[in-house]
Each structure stands twice: as C-alpha cells, then as structure tokens.
Amino acid sequence: MKLRWYALREAGDDLLGSAPLRYVTSVDLPVPPEEAWAALTAQDALVSWSAVVTGLRWTSPHPFGVGTTREVTVLWLVGARERYYRWDTGRRKTFTALSTTVPGLRRLAEDYLVEPTPVGSQFVWTLAVEPRPALLPLLKLAGPLIAWTLRRVAAGLRSQVP
C-alpha cells in the first residue's frame, strides 16, 4: 500500500517541553548504557522488539549523528520520516519528524535518553506532538492508548538486551 505523506514544520527542544500532547515513559534495563544504546541504534531497532512498529529504515549511512534520517512505520499504516538534530552517542538522540502519513499534525519530536543506574541503565522516551486544532480533541481522547503503546514499546526493549 502506498502511503500519502504530509509535510510537518521542524520541531526542536521547545516542543519537547511545551507540546500540547506530551508523553514520557521510561524503562529500567539490566545492562550498561552502551548496550542499551546499541539496541536503540541497531538496523532493526524498534521492529525487533515491538509488534507495533512494523518497519524501520535508516536512510543515512553509518556513522550515525546529527542529520541522520530514518523512516518508521507503525502497524503498516502510519509512517514518519525523521531527522536527528541531536546525537550524543551513547547517551541521547532527538529527532524532528519531517513528514508523516497522519493529516492534521503540525510538529512532532521524540527524544531518547539513556542514563546509567546502579544496576544498569534507564531509557527515557519523550514524544511531543503539536496537532492542528481540529485534531487535538481526537488525539486527547486517544492519549491513554498512545501512552500505553509507548510503554509497551519501551518495555519491549528489555527483550533486546541480555
């Protein structure tokens, strides 16, 4: 099936802190940050540990860094084309969505943070969305489902690390 793409405005850290829709989830991992980071940047990241993410294609060559792009598909229907504006290898990466297959979005950003803990590491995932006003009520209603889905995907990361 061919997806229709809608351009978004670029987002930055301002959206991460003040988005009308903001979701934060975290998961503790029994591995050091380096191993968590490797799972988050693998060729099959997300797809191998989530039934919800059905496609991921890195569209930039290695080594990854600021400017890296990828395309992600959720449930074969919802797609996002992303560009990283922050890449602190081993610790944090943040992207803005350049386009999605969801009409009615203005901006979207995600932040992945890996921090050391006494027993391994913690992965903190922030999703920030600014929809157009007409879509906001629907996305607010879907908020609990979106939050639950993010928690499930983040928890799946545990299956990727020994």
Image (cartoon, rainbow, N blue to C red):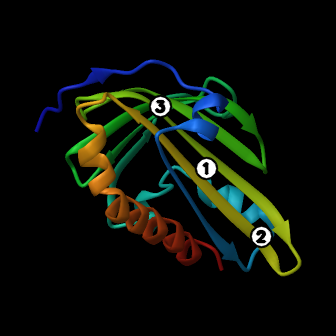
At 17% across and 32% down in the image, what residue appears?
Answer: 3
Q: Residue at x 53, y 30 (%)?
A: 96
Examine the rendered structure and indicate whether residue 146 appears above or below residue 76: below
Comes first in the chain, label 2 or label 3: 3
Say which residue appears at 58% left-offset and 50% top-offset: 126
The amino acid on which the numbered mark 3 sits, given as a three-letter code, is: Glu
In which quadrant of the rendered image does the N terminus lie? top left
Say above or below: 57 vs 105: below
Disc 2 marks a residue whose amino acid type is Ser
Expressed as whole percent of the image width and height from the top left, the position of residue 122 reads 73, 68
At label 1, counting other C-alpha atoms closer than 10 Å, the crowd grade (few under 14, some 14-19, many 20 or more) is some
Q: Quadrant of residue 103?
A: top left
Q: What amino acid type is highlighted by mark number 1?
A: Thr
Cα–Cα gap, marks 3 and 1: 14 Å
Does residue 146 appear left or right of residue 123 in this picture?
A: left
Q: Is residue 106 left or right of residue 158?
A: left
Q: Are marks 2 and 1 in contact (CB under 8 Å)?
A: no
Q: x and y percent of residue 94 in the render?
A: 63, 38
For the residues labelled 2 and 1, the Cα–Cα distance comes to 16 Å
The residue lying toward the viewer, choosing from 128 and 67, is: 128
> Which residue corresponds to mark 2?
121
Q: Nearer the viewer, mark 3 or mark 1?
A: 3
For residue 6, above or below residue 143? above
Instruction: Tell me, for residue 113, which label it has, or none.
Output: none
> Circle 1 sits on which residue?
41
Q: Tag 1, which secondary structure?
A: loop
Residue density around tag 3, few if under 14, some if 14–19, many if 20 or more, within 10 Å: many
Q: Quadrant of the C terminus?
A: bottom right
Instruction: Give the structural element (helix, strand or loop) at label 3.
Output: strand
Q: Mark 3 sits on what residue?
A: 82
Residue contact at pointers 2 and 3, CB within 8 angstroms:
no
Instruction: Count neighbours of disc 2 (C-alpha within 10 A) and say few if under 14, some if 14 to 19, many if 20 or more.
Output: many
